[in-house]
Amino acid sequence: MALSPVFQIVSFEDVPGWSRDDHGGAYAAFRRSAFHVLTKPYRTGALGIEFAAFSDAYADARPSESQDARAFFERHFVPARIVPDDRPAGFVTGFYEPEVEASPVRTDRFSVPLLARPADLVDVDDASRPPGMDSYLAFARSTPEGLVECFDRQAIEQGALVGQGLEIAWLADPVDAFFVHVQGAARLIMTDGSQRRVTYAAKSGQRFTGPGGVLAELGEIPLEKVTMQSIRAWFKANPQRVNEILWRNRSYIFFREAAVEEPELGPIAAAKVPLTPGRSMAVDRLLHTFGTPFFIDAPTLTAFDGAPFRRLMIAQDTGSAITGPARGDLFAGSGFAAGEIAGVVRNPADFFALVPRALAIGAVS
C-alpha cells in the first residue's frame, strides 16, 4: 500500500515546538500499544501507514520503561505534515471520562439507567443488512421476522427495553447520562464509596445529532459559543425542554462494565489500551492506523496548561464525529477538571504524523 500524498515529509526542525515537548508521556502511551499488538495487530488505515512498519519501534519500546523518548521517536520515525485536499487546516476537539454519582439500584433520586447491550442487538454490514434498511445502520435488532432497526433514544428512554435486566447502574440526572453517552465511558462513584467504570459496548445505530447544533439552529446559543459548558447551562435553565432537545439525537449508547485498574489512566478505548490523559487521541480509524504518533500544533489552544498546545499524541481511539485526515479528539483525562478542559476545545491545528522511517524513505525515493 502506497503512502498517501496527504503526508508531506518534513524534518523535526520543521515541527513547531518539537524540541520543547516532554515526550515521555507519549512514549508511555505508545509502549502500551506495543504490548497490546502482541495479542492482536492493528488494522492499517487507508492512508497507507502500514501496521507492519511499526514492528521495529514496538520491539524497541517493550524492554525499556524509560529511555530518551525524544531520541526514540526521532530514531524510528520521520514527521510528515498532513495537508488535506478539502480544507485549509486541521481541527481538534476534546473528550474526557466523566465521573458521576451512581446507584446500583433505582431510587427516587437515581432514576436514569445506563444500559448494557441487549441480547437481540446484532452487528450488521452491507452483506447482512436487509433491503430497505438505512445503509448507515451498523446495528439492528434480531426478531423472528428478521432484522429490524433498533429502538432509538426516545423509545428506549420511554421504556422500550424495560424488563430485560439491562440496567448496569442508575444516575440522578438525564443530562449527566447523556454526556456519558457522548463520551462513551464514565467512572461511576457508587453510593457506597466504591468506584466502577463503564465503557462503550454498542449503540442503537442511528446518526448522532449533537445538542449544540440543535440549540444553535433554534437560536438558543450562538454557534460560536457552543461548548459543553454552555449546553449544560442551557439545560439547567430550561429543564422542561431537556427531552425535546436530547431526543433529537436518535442514537443511544449501550455499555459494559470495566475494571478501574489504574486510576490515573482513562478507560480502555478502541485501540484496546487505557487512554493516557493529555497524550492519547481519537482519529478517523478508517484513514489512520492506531498507534501512530501525531504531533499537534494548535497555538490557540491553551486549555490544557495555559500554554499553546504543541504536543506529541498517540492515536488510540476513534469516534463517529472524527472524520478526515487532519481531525483529532484529544483525551483530557477523568473527572470535573478534565471536563472543563475538554468542553472548550474547538481549535484549528496542524497535524504532523510520525511515519515509520521505512515508509518515509519509500515515499521520498
Image (tube, rainbow, N blue to C red):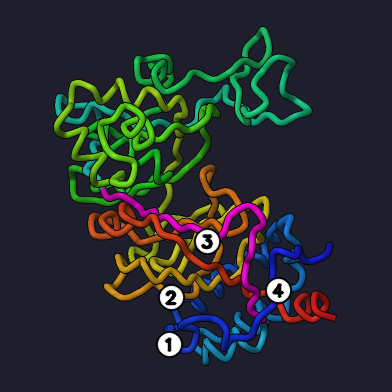
**Residue to which mark 1 is pinned:** 20
Give the crowd class for mark 1: few <14, some 14-19, many >=20 residues within 10 Å. few
Magenta highlight: main SS: strand
- The extreme front residue here reads 88
Confirm or deny contact between disc 2 and disc 1 (CB under 8 A): yes
Q: CA distance from mark 1 to mark 4?
A: 25 Å
Residue 54: give its label. 4
Residue at position x 62%, y 27% in the image: 137
Q: Pointer 3: what residue?
A: 273
> Which is nearer the N-term, disc 2 or disc 1?
1
Which one is nearer the viewer's eye here, 134 or 189? 134
The amino acid type, in three-letter code, at marker 4 is Phe
Q: 196 or 237: nearer the eye?
A: 237
The C terminus sits in image quarter? bottom right
Amino acid tagged 3: Val
Q: Is residue 240 left or right of residue 21?
A: left
Q: Which residue is mark 2?
A: 310
| Measured Cα–Cα span from mark 2 to mark 3 | 23 Å
Disc 2 and disc 3 in contact, CB within 8 angstroms: no
Is disc 1 in contact with disc 3, using a CB cutoff of under 8 Å? no
What is the x, y in percent for residue 343? 31, 52
